[in-house]
Image (cartoon, grey):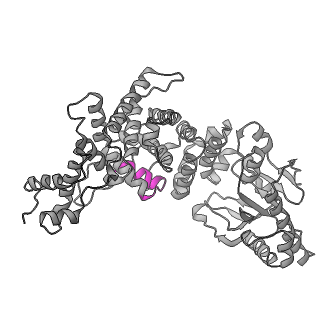
Amino acid sequence: MTAQPTTTTINLTPREAQLKELLLDTAQYVNSSQPKAEPVILRWAGGWVRDKLLGIESHDIDTAINTMTGEAFASKICELCEKPETVEKHSITSDDVGNLHKIAKNPDKSKHLETTTIKLFGFDVDFVNLRKETYSEDSRNPQVEFGTAEEDALRRDATVNALFYNLNTSKVEDFTSGLTDMNANLIKTPLEPLQTFMDDPLRVLRLVRFASRLGFTIDPAAERVMGNSKVLDALKLKISRERVGVEVEKMLKGNDPQRSLRYINDLGLYHTTFTDPTKANMPSPDLSRWHNAYECLGHIFQSGEQGSISSILIHTDEAPYYAWILSALTPWEYIDEPVHTGTGRAPPPLITLAAREGIKAPNKLCDLITAAHKNRKDILALKTAVVQKAAYINERDRLGMAIRHWDAKGGYWRLQVLFCLLVESMQRWEAVAAGSSNNDDFLGEWQLFLDHLQRLDVLDAPSMKKIIDGKQLAKSLGLKPGKWMADALEVCIAWQLRHPDATDPAGAIEEVNSRRKEWDIPSK
């Protein structure tokens, strides 16, 4: 016999109420066409219910249906919305009902049921039938069939995500312990944790994400098995790396990326997440001082005033996410790269492979990671030179051209500098509750370096407007464009950096003329 759920209520916004009434009218429309069939009951499920109870705004609503597929029910909505009386009753405008989209099931990527999505009254509404999943030991894909609300709740990753809002009764239904766990700020699995994770190992990362996002703690019974070798092996082999990457991206773009990385470290999830699972001999970096990197970055983010390390190095919309990814990858910098003995192109560094294959990082991010790896020693050397007041540190062209070089390959030179800082922090940062003079000294060196670059006005060296372009230079030298031009233009840019107030390129052209032999620039 099905247990009676614990209930509570939710206050709907006017748009949510408008959506609810349309869906209930659709259910009645379906019921009237098949009077002998089991009546359609609709429930909003999972994240929307959780967020509403927590006072968090949500525009994504999952709608669970007891007797129909999502596609069939969504088609009935579209059919009903074509009737003038429906349009009038629900005050539907031309923008209120979008196109219907079906997302096919993909068992190989642990998506076991197709869903249908439609834009309604500004909400992204998914439709899917209530279901139960039965797993067998000899298959990684479950047998999926229509189920009850309780069976649907029990198959979910966490009790706080297993709540329903019954549109027919206007009540929240809790078939697990979701309401109690929400009040206790607890992330807990509806069923026994080990079996829950073995059924779908991605739930390990999802629990980390929700705990970090909501500021909840993970149930100790779940924590004890999240790092189980069988669970980690299943996560590495069973779940597509694209889905792993999506979870990591959501974590590091979420409310508390630092806490997410702490969980990954403390629960032993790193070597399964940030690795190349296709390489049997992929090394495992030492994580004993990794916490220093993400704790240091968290400290840097806390100080965002004008001229701070954060404001200089993390200054674009995508930079915070990239910064947390770089902090996650810092342990790989202490792994020796294998010697390339072949005749072809050398493979990417291990740190790039860990990102590309482990979380399916896009090419732009992989290019940044590769550049940060390759330029790190040069960046550190220049920072050290500024701190030690080396004789050449006021040579504006030398520092400006260095920045341009760092930026030329992977872009984001500022994040490359941040990566260098974070790698160094693994050895020098002190993870202490109170302030540390050593930490102040460490960050003070990097602040000194950045302040010096600001005084020289070279922070924007990669995007500076050139005083002369290639066509103009070739004409001035009486030469045809050729391979020589790239080196010659570098000479012009260096000259321009030495003469920031110059508007006439004559001096740059003369510089090129005087260095023809050095740069192998042809004569007329």
Classify 126 as above or below 339. Answer: below
> Which residue range is magenta in the image?
348-363
Residue 234 pos. (x, y %): 56, 52
Q: Main secondary structure of the magenta part?
A: helix
Q: Residue at x 13, y 67 (%)?
A: 479
Please identify the quarter of the rendering in which residue 478 is found.
bottom left
Report if residue 359 lies within the magenta region. Answer: yes
The front one of 447 and 110 is: 447
In the rendered image, which quarter contains the C terminus?
A: bottom left
Rendered position, 175 above or below 217: below
Vertical placement of 483 versus 365: above or below?
below
Left or right placement of residue 113 versus residue 463 in this view: right
Q: Position of residue 192 (x, y in %)?
A: 71, 45
Residue 9 lies, in percent from the top left, at 86, 49
* Residue 103 position within the rendered picture, expressed as x and y whole percent measured from the top left: 64, 69
Q: Quadrant of the N terminus?
A: bottom right
From what the image shows, is residue 173 above or below residue 327?
A: below
- Residue found at x 26% / y 32%: 385
Q: Residue at x 68, y 45 (%)?
A: 193
Position of residue 138 in the picture relative to residue 453 (left or right):
right
* Front-lying residue, 80 or 283: 80
* Residue 190 visible, this orientation: no
